[in-house]
Image (spheres, helix red, strand yellow):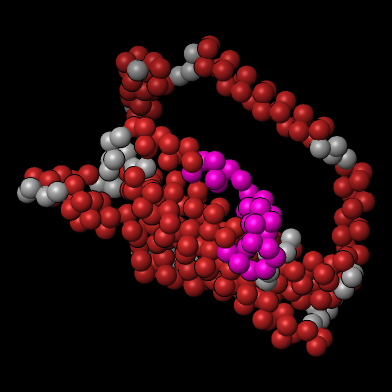
Amino acid sequence: MAPLFEKRHLQDVSDRHPGAMRYGVWERRKITGLLLFGFAMLAFGLFEAEFNFIRFYAGLFRLGEFSMLMMPPRAGDMFLVYLSALGETLSIALLGTMIGAFLALPFSVLASRNVLPAWATRFLLRRSFDTIRGVDTLIWALIWIGVVGLGPFAGVLAIATSDFGTFGKLFAEAIEAVDPRPVEGIRSTGGTAAQEFRYGALPQALPVIAGQVLYYFESNTRSATIIGIVGAGGIGLHLSEQIRTLEWQHVSFIVGMVLVVVALIDYGSSQLRRMIIGAKPV
């Protein structure tokens, strides 16, 4: 009796909501077309990239040779130099992240739909964020090196510029996603627009903003290593030099140092996020 009852119940629901229970001919064709388009784009991308399984298979053996050359990792008498450069990389990542976050916060408030009703200002700020974050950090590093010269200062400016665009978008979305009821409660008591934002929206958005800043500090540690290769200071400069001189054991040592630091930052930031927003650490 139970299977028969369930079958009749499903049939009744299907009769009342035909669009939700089964796909029509148009829906099937649309899904099939999207799948075929996706496969076609994948095939076109592999063709344009000159993907070759034979070359890939042969390259795996070459990768194994490089791995053997990197063993064991060795720093020699350069350990203190590498350690100092790694500290410089961390400083670049931290300063760039914090500067980008502090500069982006007020502009993200103006770009939030629930704070500023002016459409033109919000549109201009949103498109500015898109333009800035559309340029990779490495490109910003090359630009700032041309402006202020080689060194960590250019790296800080590059990360701060890139993060300004990213944080502006993320912070604005975090502010727009807050629960409107506390804001409406403050408004009902006669609070000003500034008080509505300060006591109603900002306390809800700050934990999310803090979590985003912590994540990007971890990500920017890797970015600071890359931009160091083009002359923006830090451990990346030494990494590029050791690759050019074929000192593969030094290369593996530098890469290992960066991996350890990123893992420690990831663990520390996960603990901080857990304390700030109650996120479960990984």
Instruction: Determine if residue 247 is in view.
Output: yes
Instruction: Find out whether residue 154 is within the magenta segment.
Output: yes
In terms of image quadrants, where is residue 212?
A: bottom left
Task: Name the residue at 25% across, 46% down.
Answer: 179
Q: Nearer the viewer, residue 259 or 196?
A: 196
In terms of image quadrants, where is residue 43?
A: top right
Dominant SS of magenta comes to: helix
The N terminus, quarter of image: top left
- The picture places residue 108, in percent across and down from the top left corner, at 38, 48
Task: Name the residue at 62% across, 75% down.
Answer: 88
- The picture places residue 102, in percent across and down from the top left corner, at 41, 60
Q: Nearer the viewer, residue 91 or 270?
A: 91
Q: Nearer the viewer, residue 272 or 13?
A: 272
Instruction: Determine if residue 263 is in view.
Output: no
**Most distant residue in the top direction:** 25
Q: Which residues are magenta?
A: 129-156
Vertical side of 264 occupied by 198: above or below: above
Instruction: Find out whether residue 65 is within the magenta segment.
Output: no
User: Is residue 244 toward the left or the right of residue 186 in the image?
Assistant: right
Task: Name the residue at 82% across, 86% down.
Answer: 76
Task: Name the residue at 40% across, 21% down.
Answer: 20
User: Is residue 117 toward the left or the right of residue 231 in the image?
Assistant: left
User: Is residue 244 toward the left or the right of residue 110 in the image?
Assistant: right
Vertical side of 173 occupied by 32: above or below: above
Q: How many marks?
A: 0
- The picture places residue 151, in percent across and down from the top left corner, at 67, 68
Vertical side of 171 occupied by 240: above or below: below
In terms of image quadrants, where is residue 207?
A: bottom left
Vertical side of 124 occupied by 92: above or below: below
**Most distant residue in the bottom direction:** 77
- The picture places residue 178, in percent across and down from the top left corner, at 29, 47
